[in-house]
Amino acid sequence: MSFYDLRTCSYDEFLNFVFDHPVEKEPWYRGSKVEVVFDAIHNTALLTELFSNARPLLEKYTREQLDQGFWALQSGLIDGLLPHTMFDHSVPFEKRAECIRAMFFLYRDLFAVDDLGTSSNMWWDCISSSNQVGWRSQSVLDDNMKIQDVMFETLSKILYLESEECQGAALHGLGHLRHPNTETVIRDWIATQPDLPEDDLEFAEACITGDIM
C-alpha cells in the first residue's frame, strides 16, 4: 500500500499525486492500494486550481496519464478527492461550489481540446450519483440539493461549448443528475441545433427522461 500525506502539499505535488503514475492494466489507485491523509479545505482549493488551469496539463503529462488521473479523481476510491469533497460539510459551501463551477474551465480548456477517451464523458456520471442517497438527515439533503443546483448550472454552460464531446458529456451528466429543470435546458439546446443528427437527438431525448446508462 502507498501512503500519501497531502495536508501541506504544493499544487505541483498534488498534480504529481494525481497524474504522475505508470499506466498499467490495474490502475495505481484500485484495490485498496492507496492511503491518504488530507485536509479537505486544502484539497478543495487544489482541485479548484486544477480545474481552473487545466490546459497546461496537456504538456505536462501523457494523454494516457491524464485519462488515468481524471478517472482517479472521479472514482470515489481515494479519500479527499471527488466526489467526497463536494459533500464534506467541513468545507464551506461556497468553496465547494467554486470547485464545481471551475469544472466548466476543465471542459472548455482541456476536454474540448482532447477528451482523453472515456474520463471526460463519464465524469458527471460518477460524481453526480453520490447526490442521490436518500437516508441522510434533512440538513445534509438540503446541502446536497444546493450542490445539485451548482452541478446543473455548470452542466448547462458546458452544454453550449462548441465541442461535440463536451456537449455529449454535458447531456450525459444532465441525464444522471435528474435536476427538475433538465428538460427545459435540453429542449432549449436542441432548438439551437437544427442540424443535429438523428442519433444525437435520440440521445438528448433519452437524457431528458434519464433513460441512459
Image (cartoon, rainbow, N blue to C red):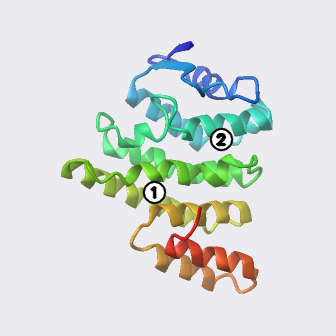
Mark 2 to mark 1 CA distance (whole Å): 19 Å
Question: In which quadrant will I find the N terminus?
Answer: top right
Secondary element at image label 1: helix
User: Is 86 placed left or right of 138 in the picture?
Assistant: right
Secondary element at image label 2: loop
Q: Nearer the viewer, residue 44 or 49?
A: 44
Q: From the viewer's perspective, is the residue at label 2 or at label 1 nearer?
A: 1
Residue 101, relative to residue 59: is it above or below? Answer: below
**Callouts 2 and 1 close, C-beta under 8 Å:** no
**Residue 52 sits in which quadrant?**
top right
Residue 91, relative to residue 184: is it above or below? Answer: above
**Residue 51 sits in which quadrant?**
top right
Residue 145, relative to residue 201: is it above or below? Answer: above
The residue beneath circle 1 is: 151
Look at 41% across and 67% down and name the residue there.
Answer: 179
Q: What type is the residue that disc 2 sits on? A: Ala
- Provide residue 178's location: percent of width, then percent of height: 44, 66
